[in-house]
Image: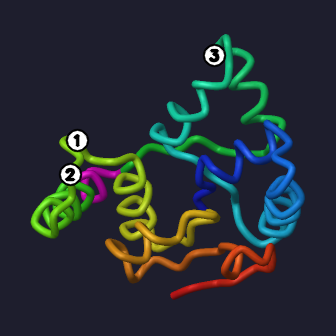
Amino acid sequence: MLLVDTNVLVDVLEDDPEWADWSIGQLRAQSKIHRLVINPIIYAELSLTFSTVEALDRTVDDLGLAVIEIPRPALFLAGKAFVRYRRQGGKKNNVPADFFIGAHAAVAGCPVLTRDRQRYSTYFSGVSLVSPASGTGKQKILK
């Protein structure tokens, strides 16, 4: 199982000139070795670019993604990471979406396909990330 971050999916859906090729390539490659999944947070973030739930559901199916629930231990871990973030000077008043995604990956023991390494590597250092190597478009897997 591999959690696919919203930014990768938006790259594909919006045909991002810089990142679409990398994101499409990664989705294809990773689908050969992992079950590609999203959670309700990623689903909600994706909904911003769709006019109906049916259109979003068709796209999720077309991309070969499964929507899975976030386990309670991951929700708890997301809250604890947020407390750490605030103690370190973080300004947000609500738990950021990346905390739910990172905690989900940590509890499930699965990697995240993302272009946004910073927050995951800072607050969920045990999570493996499949991400571009410093903006080069080449894959890098971080532990």
Which quadrant would residue 136 be assigned to in this image? bottom right
The Cα–Cα distance between marks 2 and 1, rounded to whole angstroms, is 9 Å
**Is disc 1 in contact with disc 3, using a CB cutoff of under 8 Å?**
no
Q: Is residue 60 above or below residue 110?
A: above
Is residue 26 in the magenta section? no
Which quadrant would residue 78 be assigned to in this image? bottom left
Report x, y in % for residue 122. Answer: 36, 76
Secondary structure category for the residue under label 3:
helix
**Is disc 2 in contact with disc 3, using a CB cutoff of under 8 Å?**
no
Q: In the image, is 37 to the left or to the right of 61? A: left
Front tag of 1 and 3:
1
Report x, y in % for residue 139. Answer: 76, 79
Q: Is residue 86 above or below residue 57?
A: below
Magenta highlight range:
71-75
**Residue where numbered disc 3 is placed:** 53
Q: Is residue 81 above or below residue 57?
A: below
The answer to whether residue 1 is seen in the rendering is no
**Residue where numbered disc 2 is placed:** 91
The Cα–Cα distance between marks 1 and 3, rounded to whole angstroms, is 25 Å
Q: Is residue 15 above or below residue 30?
A: above
The Cα–Cα distance between marks 2 and 3, rounded to whole angstroms, is 32 Å
Image point (77%, 35%), residue name: 61
Q: In the image, is 106 to the left or to the right of 68? A: left
Amino acid under disc 3? Val
Q: Residue furthest top?
A: 52
